Amino acid sequence: MDKLRYGIVGVGKQGSKYSLILTTGLVKNGVLTAVCDIEEDRIKWAKEKLEPKGVKVFEDYKEMIDSGLIDAVLVETPHYDHPVIATYALSKGIHTLIDKPAGVYTKAIRELNEYAAEKAKDGVKFGIMYNQRTNPLYKFAKELVEAGRIGELKRINWIITDWYRPQAYYNQGGWRGTWEGEGGGVLINQCPHQLDLFQWLGGMPVSIRGYAQYGKNRDIAVENDVTAYMEYANGATGLFVTSTHDFPGTNRLEIDGEKGKLVIEKNRLEFTELEVSESEFNATNKKFMPSIPSKKIVKKMSKLREGFMYVHEQHCGIIKNFTNHVLNGEKLIAPGEEGINGLTISNAIHLSSWLGKEVQLPIDEELYIAELNKRIEEEKQK
Ligand SMILES: NC(=O)c1ccc[n+]([C@@H]2O[C@H](COP(=O)([O-])OP(=O)(O)OC[C@H]3O[C@@H](n4cnc5c(N)ncnc54)[C@H](O)[C@@H]3O)[C@@H](O)[C@H]2O)c1
């Protein structure tokens, strides 16, 4: 195979962007041959815009997957359907790239991962659209972590409150901002990238105490204000704070390790690298309030670079990487099975909040589904 033929399930806001990426030749050796949607206006749009470019339009994803027209699929529907459609595609030997979040609850994703691992033995590939992993600042942070330059984790804090969404956003209707339609609010819709990066850079916590506020200053049933405290196996701690009603918001990631401290905020990364680790310094230091000798590395990203990034990297970068992974075995930036990690943190924050106590990871999957279903029922009663 020298070209990977893609189909897209769901050509709403996101799927239509990917259709543009694939039909404008941005992905070498990746072509769009089919799309599918179930909404009349999206089908009409696809017939007008994509059919003239040789893209066949389907109204049933199974028919598209079975058509023989595609080798790979991008799953761009609301989240509950991601694992369902992915499982079907994998069962037909179709390489599958799902969008974030992997799904709504971990049980479905654990089962999807188990299935994908079976299909991987036959060479069927599975990826997830964690496009923020291509952001140069987070990439550099990952390199520092992997090279051991931050040292053993002591603390990881992310305040990500710049997702301002007014009531008008929630009033637009559809699946967004509801338990039934998307399985939550800010954690499942806006934060999956940050929750992924949180674990990509800091590893997985072992326990979480989450405090979620539901419908804070907004007429919605789902969470839009969250503070979560986490503990790690080595005694490190984590804090994740997010909301959609603060203005102006903050987006600041801090990672403190034995050997240095990393801060990313406002498109700027600052790494303070200690000349000796804090524990070594502490073992011999005699002063009362010293500073540890260190050097700083700063990386900034210009608006121009950011614009460039959104055309060539980010989503486009993930599709390029997935294409090269299938065609030439290039290492995946975001393997599909890693989608469960951020979702586990998200589910654990909710479960802890609902139960009013700390939860251990992995969470009780059945209990999570039972509690989620209660919220869906309550929402329907309103
Ligand atoms: N990676 C990112 O940065 C990013 C950004 C935005 C959205 N997303 C994700 O993309 C997904 C879609 O979001 P969106 O904003 O495009 O939503 P959307 O509502 O605009 O589009 C979803 C489309 O899927 C279609 N659809 C639903 N069920 C279908 C089915 N069974 N078969 C075929 N089509 C079906 C709908 O008709 C709709 O056109 C979500 O999971 C969202 O989280 C990812």
Image: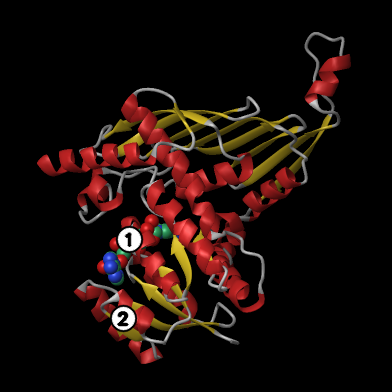
Q: Is residue 360 visible?
A: yes
Quadrant location of the C terminus? Answer: top left
Label 1 sits on what residue type?
A: Asp
Q: Residue at x 32, y 60 (%)?
A: 81
For label 1, being within 8 Å of ligand 1 is answered: yes
The residue that disc 2 covers is 63
Instruction: State the SS at label 2.
Output: helix
- Picture quadrant where residue 123 is located: bottom right
**Mark 1 or mark 2, which is nearer the start of the sequence?**
2
The residue that disc 1 covers is 81
Q: Is residue 6 above or below residue 74?
A: below
Q: Residue at x 58, y 83 (%)?
A: 29
Asked whether the beta carbons under mark 2 and mark 1 sit within 8 Å of each other, the answer is no
Q: Is residue 96 above or below residue 52?
A: above
The x, y position of residue 171, in whole percent, is: 20, 49
Give whichever of 93, 341 is nearer the camera. 93
Instruction: State the SS at label 1.
Output: helix
